[in-house]
Image (cartoon, coloured by chain):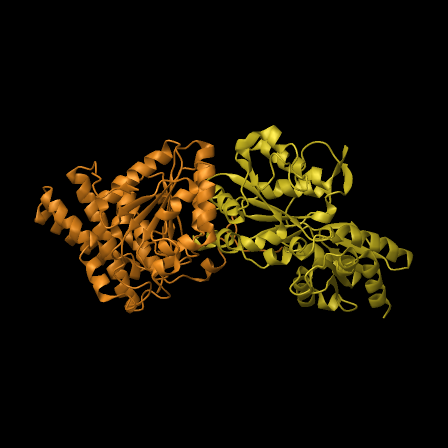
Chain colours: A yellow, B orange
């Protein structure tokens, strides 16, 4: 058992898989010699060398195109897109090429690759380096979308993503990179498409993702002091989506609150609301309520960014108001 | 600049007859595909390579079976030239289950992994970086495979082209980029919207590559330059880019008559029909007219038979709709 930061867990997860499988290679900007701009890949170049850990030019289309071409010819590449906002400059490769080519070729091609990226706000970087883009990826048929919320899940879900034969968009909440937890020794391998119950409650179910998970847990602790006992569910993977666990936990409490960092429109909580409305409507005791970032580009100023992204206070206030009305 | 007009091919007459057969197959396939489009057997769209056959045939002749082709939406010729039978290609164009991808890809996405045809890509320029990835994989695994990536003149003005060339050059990847310069993008002359006269060759030096232009209507010249570039890539000497000058006899796609092009330009290029020229050359090199006519009639019979086999294929059923989004063969995104 060792205490690891979220960012250290990234390197540990990648290293775990690179040790067991020579076909795993890693490419991206500043990932090697620099150890990653967020220091999430420190030590990988030293251990695995420049043939397997390759620094690239600032060429996101080339990075992801190379990952795709390598994946379809026998490798299991991991590609880094430094900030998730940069997906916009290489989205053709993601949405038109990687996502569609297996279906278009009637299954002739397979793309076992992982694209990991620093996602979301909280670091005062302004609108072009802060957006939560999980909904961009979730709406594309052919992409899996994984969003861990803690160091242990980073390792286990990274391993599962690398071993998976489909393309996985692996989004790391930048605001969690410094968070720490105890991590067991030895190999950690998790399962994609499994939501996790982090807290059991009787009155309401809070479903959260990525950086919103620790906030939801803290909010639930405060709400419990005020007599509202909440289940907290970490979605962990948007595609595949563990609807069985979500429906079960929502039905058990009769209330659903989503906590989403993405701007409001077409956030994952909208899809979840639709599923729960269609399939668990008669188990609901009140409206489904989504707690999201407003539908705005994220502002840079700390005061403004803190107002935009769901805070513990806003989660508590919104749930209290809804439960007491 | 390399002058390849005098390049001599190393092929013997037997091999040249095969190269002729390949070009005739591409021509007759495409001619039939056009007819099938007009008859509404082929729906949606199709982009034909009539007039450009020497490039696909010449390169395919220079490639090993284990090498990879990356093609564009104008990819029928590149697919067939690698040995993919006509029937599944016709059937794919017609949306039948006996199609190369059971009708799920269509004309613009022909793929046959078993023949090394690693896809036909319909977003301009997108496949240049993908070809780099395959080449990287070959380099990493030490397999001696070479990726050959075909694209049109219009692709040279999109970002992915430039990213891929730099990437291939710095990693010394075994990839050969082939610009089929047919002078027109869709309906606009390429030189009207491009800063240089030769859209690929004039950019090569920016990536430390030799500027290579070849007569794309001369299959022997194409074969010679292809052999050199592929050998170079296989030997670990890095990428090449070749600009092959050619002309499409028809329009950009579908039933486009290509009337935006001046008559004298069309006439000039029709006089340089690669198949007519190759026919004449083979006669001077010892082939008989009877040999060449037999190839043409054999191919005509093959086209006829393949067309009927394709037409006889079943219409896809619902079982295919939700198949193969994922590697497990299904389309489930939830439990």
**In the displayed structure, would residue B291 be above or below residue B66?**
below
| Residue at the extreme bottom | A325
Question: On the rendered image, what quadrant is the C terminus of chain B found in?
Answer: bottom right
**In the displayed structure, would residue B234 be above or below residue B4?**
above
Count of marks, rendered view: 0
Q: Is residue A320 left or right of residue A135?
A: right
Q: Is residue B291 left or right of residue B59?
A: left
Foreground residue, A194 or A86? A86
Q: Position of residue A253 (x, y in %)?
A: 79, 61
Q: At 47% across and 36% down in the image, what residue appears?
A: B171
Q: Quadrant of residue A142?
A: bottom right
Q: Position of residue A57 (x, y in %)?
A: 53, 42
Whether residue B322 is visible, yes or no, is yes
Foreground residue, B122 or A308? A308
Q: Quadrant of residue B211?
A: top left
Q: Is residue B82 left or right of residue A287?
A: left
Foreground residue, A311 or A290? A311
Q: Is residue B287 left or right of residue A150?
A: left
Foreground residue, B129 or A157? B129
Question: On the rendered image, what quadrant is the N terminus of chain B found in?
Answer: top left
Q: Position of residue B16 (x, y in %)?
A: 18, 42
Q: At 34% across and 61% down in the image, what residue appears?
A: B189
Q: Position of residue A77 (x, y in %)?
A: 54, 40
Whether residue B133 is visible, yes or no, is no
């Amino acid at each position: 058992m060792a205490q690891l930061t979220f960012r250290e867990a990234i390197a540990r997860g990648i290293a775990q898989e690179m040790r067991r499988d020579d076909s795993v290679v890693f490419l991206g900007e500043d990932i090697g010699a620099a150890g990653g701009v967020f220091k999430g890949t420190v030590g990988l170049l030293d251990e695995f060398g420049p043939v397997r850990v390759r620094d690239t030019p600032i060429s996101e289309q080339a990075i992801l195109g190379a990952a795709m071409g390598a994946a379809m010819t026998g490798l299991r590449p991991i590609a880094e897109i430094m900030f998730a906002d940069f997906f916009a400059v290489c989205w053709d490769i993601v949405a038109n090429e990687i996502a569609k080519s297996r279906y278009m070729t009637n299954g002739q091609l397979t793309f076992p690759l992982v694209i990991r990226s620093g996602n979301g706000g909280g670091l005062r970087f302004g609108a072009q380096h802060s957006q939560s883009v999980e909904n961009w990826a979730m709406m594309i048929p052919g992409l899996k979308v994984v969003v861990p919320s803690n160091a242990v899940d980073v390792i286990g879900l990274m391993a599962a993503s690398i071993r998976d034969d489909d393309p996985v968009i692996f989004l790391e909440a930048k605001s969690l990179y410094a968070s720490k937890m105890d991590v067991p020794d030895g190999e950690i391998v998790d399962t994609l498409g499994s939501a996790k119950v982090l807290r059991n409650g009787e009155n309401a179910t809070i479903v959260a993702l990525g950086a919103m998970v620790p906030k939801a847990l803290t909010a639930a602790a405060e709400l419990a002091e005020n007599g509202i006992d909440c289940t907290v569910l970490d979605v962990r993977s948007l595609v595949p989506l563990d609807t069985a666990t979500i429906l079960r936990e929502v039905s058990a409490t009769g209330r659903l609150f989503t906590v989403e960092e993405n701007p409001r429109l077409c956030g994952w909580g909208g899809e979840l609301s639709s599923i729960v409305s269609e399939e668990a409507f008669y188990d609901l005791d009140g409206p489904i309520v989504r707690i999201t970032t407003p539908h705005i580009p994220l502002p840079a100023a700390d005061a403004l960014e803190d107002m935009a992204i769901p805070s513990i206070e806003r989660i508590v206030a919104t749930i209290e108001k809804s439960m007491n009305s | 600049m390399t002058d390849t007009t005098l390049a001599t091919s190393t092929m013997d007459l037997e091999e040249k007859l095969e190269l002729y057969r390949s070009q005739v197959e591409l021509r007759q396939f495409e001619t039939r595909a056009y007819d099938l489009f007009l008859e509404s057997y082929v729906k949606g769209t199709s982009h034909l390579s009539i007039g450009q056959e020497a490039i696909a045939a010449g390169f395919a002749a220079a490639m090993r079976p284990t090498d990879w082709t990356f093609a564009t939406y104008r990819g029928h010729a590149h697919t067939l030239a690698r040995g993919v039978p006509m029937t599944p290609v016709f059937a794919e164009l017609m949306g039948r289950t006996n199609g190369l991808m059971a009708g799920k890809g269509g004309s613009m996405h022909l793929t046959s992994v078993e023949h090394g045809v690693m896809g036909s890509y319909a977003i301009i320029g997108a496949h240049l970086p993908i070809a780099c990835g395959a080449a990287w994989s070959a380099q990493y695994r030490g397999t001696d495979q070479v990726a050959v990536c075909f694209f049109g003149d219009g692709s040279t003005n999109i970002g992915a082209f430039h990213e891929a060339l730099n990437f291939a050059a710095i990693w010394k990847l075994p990839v050969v980029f082939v610009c089929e310069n047919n002078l027109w993008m869709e309906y606009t002359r390429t030189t009207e919207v491009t800063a240089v006269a030769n859209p690929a060759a004039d950019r090569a030096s920016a990536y430390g590559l030799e500027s290579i232009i070849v007569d794309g209507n001369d299959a022997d010249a194409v074969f010679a330059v292809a052999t050199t570039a592929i050998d170079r890539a296989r030997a670990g000497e890095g990428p090449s880019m070749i600009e092959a000058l050619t002309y499409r006899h028809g329009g950009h796609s579908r039933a486009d008559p290509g009337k935006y092009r001046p008559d004298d330009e069309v006439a000039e290029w029709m006089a340089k029909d690669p198949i007519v020229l190759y026919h004449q050359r083979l006669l001077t090199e010892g082939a008989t007219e009877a040999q060449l006519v037999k190839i043409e009639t054999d191919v005509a019979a093959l086209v006829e038979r393949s067309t009927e086999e394709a037409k006889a294929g079943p219409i896809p059923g619902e079982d295919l709709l939700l198949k193969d989004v994922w590697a497990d063969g299904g389309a489930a995104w939830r439990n």
